[in-house]
Image (cartoon, rainbow, N blue to C red):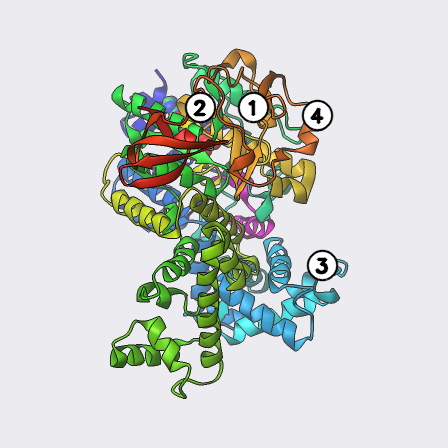
């Protein structure tokens, strides 16, 4: 036994291995724990916090601890409280943003702000930049506000105030006037008593560099500084840390270069190398024992990440048993993948697996929809971590509001929701007028509006905006008679300016929202009418309500950083989806390595079981795509995976040949990978029917459909069936029915 177990004051030390313990006990001077996933970095940080307090080396208020999310901060506080009691309350514990905001509020005046300054959201930021571009007569078609804002935000990430942006930076942006716009933007923010997220850190850095007396106060205050997920800090955050740490120099950072996944948001994995330069006397601790995952899982994760060239390199080992191999599964299409995962979860649940220890991690937010619908159909409780469920997302609700008014003009709630989204001059006052008119005439809002716009009750932009909207609605409704409703919805989102609104938004989540909107169109495709789809959504959402307690977690790989689960499902490992094509287009090899780190983060979340899956066909953004397995699939070593395939479908790693309807056993060639997946034009029609074992259906056959019940096939075309159900004739996907 270690000596610590003999010390009744520090029983927690006995729960650490020797290098972990060294990292906890080395309290003086700079310390970097550079170690792979699951080696106990967060445990070290938490124990160190408890140890500092437990040994009374500092008061809680003298400790600054930085976590990557607010949730992680809460968890750390709970753990420390469990170790040492309520002392933990006073620690300065939070994310970079929350801590920097706290400091900034105390000294706002020194930066020309008042302590009650507002923190702007992206909407406001874009609007401000737009005004400035207009004033400068810069064409915002050529230089959209979001591009200019993006440039400014990256400068802020790099700690550059307008006067410090290098002369050659920004070059073309905003017709070469980007730095000037940046300076004006900062000035406007000051006048508005506001700042944006980037400013929180930037102002702190300015404060500390221009007011040594203030910095000195914090030097005296913070005896110990601790940072988790250090690999994802950007330059501004690094400068902030370095300034604060100059006092007592007790800075402890823990991180893993192989888990740096926020390069696209300005994170600098090079900060790890800088640490050793800026603190030459730093102690570097490496941890190599992984406590999280069983052998096969760890071996797969290690082999995968070994394909990255730019990494510091490290070996991990585990004393755990080899456990199950990583389950690798190829399926016919996305729907079958969702069905298979649903069944697999039900089996695990029957065997006593808690749902709360199961996670499904996707590359992009829109991917959750298919699984959510499946889970709801099965009655499997789930939660979407780090975001709302698919149909509760703001952009989806907006789009659904448009759809609802098309289907049901009297839907006042829907109308109110989107009357001025995107902005079209219909302000609060106009809405009030509209309400009055509607009450007086006892008509729904839209009908009242039709009357109102012919009167003088309403004027100016509100009147013209409303008039146009009503005309649009009439036109879109007419379109429904001749076009498929999915197509009409696409037109609605385009012509209303709704899609454009998100395209113009530069916030990090805007591209995800656009993907969600496209996924919504995909969802619409499967329904016969718009009304049927809307009904489905309301039923789905109603069923989703009551599910407290034990739940499966759905989230993106990015939000899974630092977490762990017994069972992890990693669906959608296909070229064109993961690695994510947008990332690759923009930054090539560097981005590919970041995608691979993301895959590595995914695999290393699993304790006992990991499932990787890919589908041969996927409907992405309303296009059927025949896909090839992600290159990451072929990087998983044969001896650590358990390949299974649908009979007659996948022999494992391979590619579907759409000309002879067969799958070939081979790794995708380099050329195929470069070319990327092949898009099959148009929609379901061109996709071949599911091959055996389910032979094509014939006319007259009896089938069963989960939603519509029993019916008889009356017509067959590729992939689709016309079926006479008790409730009437429906067009259904053949994959949705079973032989009765
Ligand atoms: P990540 O890189 O994914 O953030 P990490 O390095 O922060 O991982 P932790 O989350 O701290 O790793 O630890 C991983 C798991 O291993 C946790 O369940 C933790 O409780 C456990 N663990 C860590 N160290 C030990 C130890 N010495 N003995 C037993 N279990 C440990
Ligand atoms: Mg961790």
Residue drawn at (37%, 80%) of the image? 451
Residue range in magenta is: 225-247
Identify the residue under disc 2: 611
The answer to which of marks 3 and 2 sits earlier in the sequence is 3
Q: Circle 2 — which element? A: strand
Q: Nearer the viewer, mark 3 or mark 2?
A: 2
CA distance for labels 4 and 2 = 25 Å
Identify the residue under disc 1: 633
Q: Magenta segment: does it hold 227? A: yes
Q: Magenta segment: does it hold 663? A: no
Which of the 4 quarters of the picture holds residue 732? Answer: top left
The answer to which of marks 3 and 4 sits earlier in the sequence is 3
Q: Is residue 361 above or below residue 100?
A: above
The answer to which of marks 4 and 2 sits earlier in the sequence is 2
The answer to which of marks 1 and 4 sits earlier in the sequence is 1
**Where in the figure is residue 623, as x and y percent of width and height?**
55, 41
Please state, as top left, top right, bottom left or bottom right, where the C terminus lies in the image.
Answer: top left
Q: Is residue 179 visible?
A: yes
Q: Main secondary structure of the magenta part?
A: helix
Q: Circle 3 — which element? A: loop
Q: Residues within 10 Å of mark 2 (few under 14, many from 20)?
A: many
Which of the 4 quarters of the picture holds residue 734? Answer: top left
CA distance for labels 3 and 2 = 44 Å
- State yes or no: discs 3 and 2 in contact (Cβ < 8 Å): no
- State yes or no: discs 4 and 2 in contact (Cβ < 8 Å): no
Q: Is the shortest distance between ligand 1 and the CB of mark 3 under 8 Å?
A: no
Identify the residue under disc 3: 170
- State yes or no: discs 2 and 1 in contact (Cβ < 8 Å): no
Q: Is residue 391 above or below residue 692?
A: below
Identify the residue under disc 4: 670
CA distance for labels 1 and 4 = 14 Å
- State yes or no: discs 3 and 1 in contact (Cβ < 8 Å): no
């Amino acid at each position: 036994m270690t000596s610590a177990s003999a010390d009744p004051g520090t029983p927690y030390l006995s729960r650490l291995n020797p290098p972990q313990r060294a990292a906890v006990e080395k309290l003086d001077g700079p310390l970097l724990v550079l170690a792979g996933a699951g080696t106990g970095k967060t445990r070290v940080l938490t124990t160190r916090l408890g140890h500092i307090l437990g040994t009374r080396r500092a008061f809680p208020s003298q400790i600054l601890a930085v976590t990557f999310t607010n949730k992680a901060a809460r968890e750390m506080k709970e753990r420390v409280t469990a170790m040492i009691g309520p002392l933990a309350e006073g620690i300065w514990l939070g994310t970079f943003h929350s801590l920097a905001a706290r400091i900034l509020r105390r000294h706002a005046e020194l930066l020309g702000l008042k302590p009650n300054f507002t923190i702007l959201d992206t909407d406001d930021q874009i609007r401000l930049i737009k005004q400035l571009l207009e004033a400068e007569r810069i064409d915002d078609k050529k230089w959209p506000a979001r591009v200019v804002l993006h440039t400014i935000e990256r400068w802020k990430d790099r700690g550059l105030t307008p006067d410090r942006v290098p002369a050659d930076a920004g070059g073309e942006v905003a017709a070469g006037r980007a730095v000037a716009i940046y300076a004006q933007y900062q000035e406007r923010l000051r006048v508005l008593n506001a700042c944006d997220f980037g400013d929180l850190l930037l102002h702190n850095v300015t404060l500390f560099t221009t007011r040594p007396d203030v910095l000195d106060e914090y030097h005296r205050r913070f005896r110990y500084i601790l940072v988790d997920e250090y690999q994802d800090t950007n330059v501004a955050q690094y400068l902030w840390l370095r300034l604060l740490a100059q006092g007592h120099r007790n800075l402890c950072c823990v991180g893993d270069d192989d888990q740096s996944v926020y390069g696209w948001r300005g994170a600098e994995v090079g900060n790890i190398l800088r640490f050793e330069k800026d603190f030459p006397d730093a102690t570097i601790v490496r941890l190599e024992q992984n406590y999280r995952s069983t052998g096969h899982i760890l071996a797969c994760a290690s082999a995968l990440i070994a394909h990255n060239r730019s990494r510091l390199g490290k070996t991990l080992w585990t004393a755990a048993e080899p456990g199950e191999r990583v389950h690798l599964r190829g399926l016919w299409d996305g729907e079958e993948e969702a069905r298979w995962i649903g069944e697999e979860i039900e089996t695990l649940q029957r065997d006593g697996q808690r749902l709360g220890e199961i996670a499904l991690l996707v590359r992009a937010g829109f991917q959750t929809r298919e699984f959510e619908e499946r889970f709801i159909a099965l009655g499997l409780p789930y939660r979407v971590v780090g975001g709302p469920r698919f149909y509760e997302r703001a952009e989806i609700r907006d789009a659904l509001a448009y759809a609802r008014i098309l289907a049901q003009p009297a839907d006042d709630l829907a109308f109110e929701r989107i009357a001025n989204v995107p902005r079209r001059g219909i302000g609060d006052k106009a809405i009030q007028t509209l309400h009055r008119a509607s009450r007086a005439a006892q008509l729904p809002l839209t009908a009242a509006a039709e009357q109102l716009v012919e009167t003088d009750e309403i004027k100016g932009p509100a009147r013209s905006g409303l008039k146009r909207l009503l005309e649009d609605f009439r036109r879109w409704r007419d379109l429904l008679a001749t076009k498929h409703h999915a197509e009409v919805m696409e037109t609605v989102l385009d012509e209303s300016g709704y899609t454009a609104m998100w395209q113009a938004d530069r916030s990090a989540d805007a591209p995800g929202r656009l993907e969600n909107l496209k996924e919504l169109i995909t969802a619409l495709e499967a329904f016969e009418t718009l009304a049927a789809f809307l009904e489905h959504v309301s039923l789905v959402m109603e069923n989703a309500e009551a599910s407290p307690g034990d739940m499966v977690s759905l989230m993106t790989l990015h939000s899974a950083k630092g977490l762990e689960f017994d069972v992890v499902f990693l669906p959608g490992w296909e070229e064109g989806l993961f690695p994510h094509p947008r990332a690759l287009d923009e930054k090539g090899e560097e981005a590919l390595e970041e995608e691979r780190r993301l895959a590595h983060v995914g695999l290393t979340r699993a304790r006992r079981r990991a499932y990787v899956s890919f589908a041969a066909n996927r409907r992405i953004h309303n296009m059927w795509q025949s896909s090839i397995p992600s290159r990451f699939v072929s990087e998983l070593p044969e001896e650590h995976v358990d390949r299974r395939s649908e009979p007659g479908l996948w022999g494992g790693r391979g590619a579907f040949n759409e000309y002879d309807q067969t799958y070939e056993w081979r790794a995708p060639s380099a050329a195929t990978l470069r070319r990327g997946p092949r898009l099959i034009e148009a929609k379901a029609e061109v996709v071949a029917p599911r091959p055996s074992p389910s032979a094509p259906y014939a006319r007259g056959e009896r089938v069963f459909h989960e939603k519509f019940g029993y019916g008889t096939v009356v017509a067959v075309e590729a992939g689709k069936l016309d079926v006479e159900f008790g409730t009437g004739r429906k067009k259904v996907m053949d994959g949705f029915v079973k032989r009765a």
